[in-house]
Image (cartoon, rainbow, N blue to C red):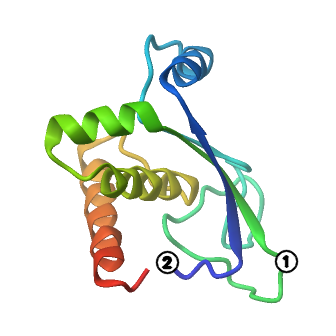
Amino acid sequence: MGWANAGLSLTLLGDRAMARLNRETFGRRGPTNVIAFPLEEKRDLRGGSWGTPPTPGTPPNNSSQPPLILGEVVISVETTRSQAAENGWPWEELFDFYLIHGILHLVGHDHDTSETEAAMTARTWELMDLLREGGG
């Protein structure tokens, strides 16, 4: 993705803890598969000014900068396993899919419109294909 110096936090939860997080964060009942928390939502992740939304997928432009912490991705392992079983996926592959989805949120992607959802889905599958080919 071009983010060689970027880092993130990954938290794995069970459904009970994920349901509580989902309720406290979004006011939604029950667990969800993945939630992403960008560390600095309003910062231009390209290294520019504050207050400018990041361009999705644009890496920082200064490699001499210290590692950039993008934020946190939280995944429910229980939900991932059950959804994988329901859809006939290996659970580890669905886990990778949710991790990529969460990372894309951290770098500025979203799915709040049909256009942004299509772009995010396409990028997710592109990155999944790289993983499958051993290029990730």
> 48 left or right of 30?
right
Please report whichever mark, 2 or 1, sits nearer to the chain's N-terminal start.
2
Q: Secondary structure at mark 2?
A: loop
Task: Identify the amino acid type marked 2.
Answer: Met
Is disc 1 placed on a helix, strand or loop? loop
The answer to which of 81 and 45 lies nearer the viewer is: 81
Q: Which mark is residue 66?
A: 1
For label 1, count other residues whose C-alpha is less than 10 Å away and answer few (under 14), some (14-19) or many (20+): few
Residue 26 against residue 42 in the figure, above or below: above
Q: Residue at x 77, y 57 (%)?
A: 50
Residue 94, horizontal then vertical, whole percent: 32, 51
User: Where in the figure is residue 21, as x and y percent of width and height?
Assistant: 60, 22
Residue 135 percent location from the top left of the image: 39, 86
- Left or right: where does residue 100 sit relative to residue 66? left
Label 1 sits on what residue type? Pro
Residue assigned mark 2? 1
Q: CA distance from mark 2 to mark 1?
A: 17 Å
Q: Is residue 136 left or right of residue 50?
A: left
Q: Residue at x 26, y 65 (%)?
A: 125
How many marks the image carries: the answer is 2
> Which residue is found at the position 32% from the left and 49% from the top?
91
Residue visible at 20% across and 50% down?
Answer: 89
- The image shows residue 27, relative to residue 67, as above or below, that is above
Residue in the foreground of this view, choosing between 131 and 85: 85
Expressed as whole percent of the image width and height from the top left, the position of residue 95 reads 39, 51
How many other residues sit within 10 Å of disc 2, few (<14), some (14-19) or many (≥20)?
A: few
